[in-house]
Image (tube, grey):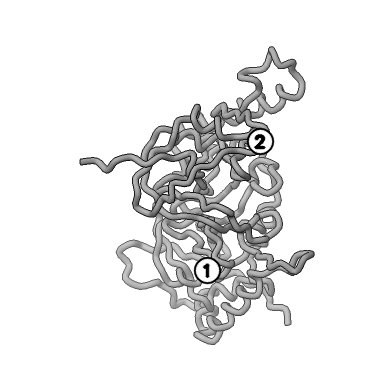
Amino acid sequence: MTRVQTAVNPEALNLRVGEMVEVLSEAEILATLDERGELEELPFMPEMLAFCGQRLTVHKVAHKLCDTISRTGMRRMERAVHLTGARCDGQAHGGCQTACLIYWKEAWLRRVDPGDPAPAAADGTAHDLAASAGPAAGRRLLPVVEVAARKEPGPAGEERFSCQATELLRAAPTCLPLKDVRQYVMDVRTGNAGMFFTLRAFLVGLFNRFQDRSGRVLPRWLRIKGGLRWGFVKGRLVGATPSVTLDLRPGELVRIKSKEEIVKTLNQDLLNRGMGFEEEMSRYCGQTARVLSRVDRCIDEKTGRMLQMKSPCIVLEGVVCAGAYTVSCPREFIPFWREIWLERVEEPA
């Protein structure tokens, strides 16, 4: 039977960074979802159930995102936010270790006063009607979202997953042009970024657009830095790329090598043994950080297949994609680092 999707929060909350919200109960969220466990094509994932009833602050307003599936640029997202500390742990998706920031539709949240000891609702609104469904409705949510977390098996029968990352082109179907100034006003107004950061990110976007076009129409001698995008990362290797095994462990202190050292390990597609080094990662070159974890599996956003790495990559504490080179994208990807791009350093005395 097809469930009718109802609106728990019919009016936009217009949330800002730093505001406190409460994640609705399972029963209330169930009332917003269609038969696929989605709201406006965005899946509610099993990993999100642990946050139901919790109070968290808005980390970023997710009004846009960078398309990492088909590389069409920025896409527009409606009425969604990222919450502080709410990353996907991958438990319902084969142990995926990408640790994406979760998207939360405003309809799954309510704004609360930090000093308010309990959620307020006793006026017969849609919130009360959804909550009255009680624990039984909550128990119905888990099977719905667990089934939705799987796609049809691949051609060879391999398991395939469905998550917010694999379905983002459906959830954000509209491209967001670089020239649409409303996105930059939104970045500043919501607190996603300061005015200087936003202006700089816009100028970098303009520069990258020029570089992409100049590489197609200008002779090589007229191109700026050979037509490279901002960050100016150029790999030169042909064929196999080198590797180093450091066997790094969580808690160890490392230094990210210089850009000059790292580009010597990359092929012309900026890959080292299939792992990409993005221009934004070069912003961290020369810095020190602690190892957070070792990563050996992640979901391919295009196909939903689980990718098993032959040699683990490293995640570093506090190192995320800040969107400085991607028009202030708020997704805050966690970069994966090859061990050859890192080196151990001595602990400070």
- The mark tally for this picture is 2
> 202 left or right of 300?
left
Label at residue 269 = 2
Q: Earlier in the sequence, mark 2 or mark 1?
A: 1
Image position of 77 with respect to 214: above or below: below
Q: From the viewer's side, name the closer residue of 51 and 229.
A: 229
Q: Quick check: can you spot residue 332?
A: no
Image location of residue 203, percent across then percent down: 56, 27
Q: Quadrant of residue 240?
A: top right
Give the residue at the far top of this rendering.
221
Mark 2, secondary structure of its residue: loop
Task: Name the amino acid type tagged 1.
Answer: Gln
| The C terminus lies in quadrant | top left
Could you classify mark 2 by the number of other residues whose Cα lies within 10 Å: few (under 14), some (14-19), or many (20 or more)? some
Q: Which residue is at 71% across, 22% downward?
A: 214
Labels 2, 1: front one: 2
Mark 1, secondary structure of its residue: loop
Label at residue 131 = none
Q: Quadrant of residue 39?
A: bottom right
Q: From the viewer's side, name the closer residue of 330 and 16.
A: 330
Q: Quick check: can you spot residue 257?
A: yes
| Alpha carbon separation for disc pair 2 and 1 | 32 Å
Image location of residue 46, percent across then percent down: 55, 71
Image location of residue 180, percent across then percent down: 63, 36
Pointer 1 residue = 91
Image location of residue 259, percent across then percent down: 49, 30
Could you classify mark 1 by the number of other residues whose Cα lies within 10 Å: few (under 14), some (14-19), or many (20 or more)? few
Q: Which residue is at 68% across, 78% downward?
A: 3
Give the residue at the far right of this rendering.
155
> 215 left or right of 58?
right
Task: Name the amino acid type tagged 2.
Answer: Asp
